[in-house]
Image: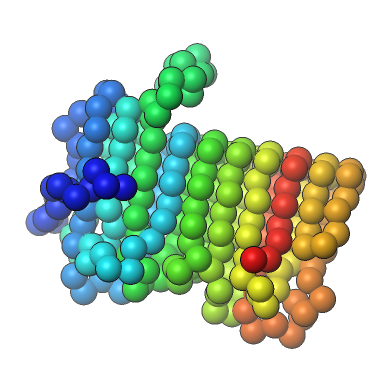
């Protein structure tokens, strides 16, 4: 994210921050000072293509965002840790056209790792790469379908719930060694790998958990609705 070196930091005074070119090709950078904020909430309100989420231990802002191609509306208010990224509505053919253009619609988000975060993606996402390994994660919700996703989860405090709605395809959850997990897949699964166990096809509801789940102080509840294919949940 070298393009953020010349970032224009948004210093807001109670008004919602919005980009000048909503839904138009171009580049745009955004940020908001951390200030006295003690938590953060990031939401992609519509379908979110080509998303990269990372953290930066040296960053003094609550978040930094860089967009290429389609520029979404970004809403954030000073004094609140809520950041909402809202891509414009496009019909299916428009999304296909943008998807096949190289780097046509990329979102690169850096999150401040000194505060806990809740993350929510509405309307589905494709090509999601999220390295949250240094984050304090309170919850993760991915609604509307997920495909081609690599998500590295952090060492959590207590039980943290990860919800995925609308079915998943080609998605991997990495969690730290020593962190337990309980997995529920509704609607069956094909090509499911959970730690060292592999399942070619399972019908109906699937439930499984790591051996230490019941007594673990650090654990994830991963709930997936609508079936799953090529799903991997492992430790690193």
* Residue ID at (37%, 40%): 107
Tell whether 47 sits left or right of 70: right
Of residues 113 and 90, the one nearer the viewer is 113
Of residues 149 and 37, the one nearer the viewer is 149
Tell whether 190 sits left or right of 99: right
Query: Residue 160, located in which quarter of the rendered image?
Result: bottom right
* Residue ID at (43%, 24%): 102
Q: Percent x, y for residue 130?
A: 49, 53
95, above or below 14, in the image = above
Of residues 53 and 214, the one nearer the viewer is 53
* Residue ID at (68%, 66%): 235
Query: Residue 35, located in which quarter of the rendered image?
Result: bottom left
Tell whether 198 sits left or right of 41: right
Q: Percent x, y for residue 98?
A: 43, 21
Q: Percent x, y for residue 22?
A: 25, 29
* Residue ID at (31%, 38%): 67
Whether residue 147 is visible to the viewer of this picture, yes or no, is yes
1, above or below 212, in the image = above
Q: Quadrant of the C terminus?
A: bottom right
């Amino acid at each position: 994210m070298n393009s953020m070196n010349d970032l224009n930091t948004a210093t807001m005074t109670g008004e919602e921050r919005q980009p000048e070119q909503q839904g138009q090709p171009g580049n745009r950078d955004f940020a908001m000072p951390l200030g006295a904020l003690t938590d953060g909430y990031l939401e992609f309100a519509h379908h979110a293509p080509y998303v990269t989420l990372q953290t930066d231990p040296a960053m003094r802002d609550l978040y930094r965002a860089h967009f290429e191609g389609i520029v979404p509306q970004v809403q954030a208010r000073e004094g609140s840790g809520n950041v909402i990224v809202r891509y414009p509505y496009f019909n299916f053919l428009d999304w296909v056209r943008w998807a096949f253009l190289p780097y046509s619609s990329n979102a690169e988000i850096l999150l401040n790792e000194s505060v806990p975060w809740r993350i929510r993606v509405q309307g589905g996402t494709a090509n999601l790469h999220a390295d949250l390994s240094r984050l304090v994660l309170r919850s993760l919700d991915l609604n509307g379908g997920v495909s081609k996703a690599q998500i590295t989860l952090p060492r959590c405090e207590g039980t943290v719930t990860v919800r995925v709605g609308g079915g998943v395809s080609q998605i991997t959850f990495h969690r730290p060694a020593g962190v337990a997990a309980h997995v529920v897949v509704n609607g069956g699964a094909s090509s499911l790998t959970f730690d060292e166990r592999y399942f070619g096809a399972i019908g109906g509801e699937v439930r499984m958990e790591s051996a230490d789940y019941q007594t673990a102080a650090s654990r994830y509840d991963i709930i997936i609705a609508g079936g799953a294919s090529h799903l991997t949940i492992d430790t690193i």
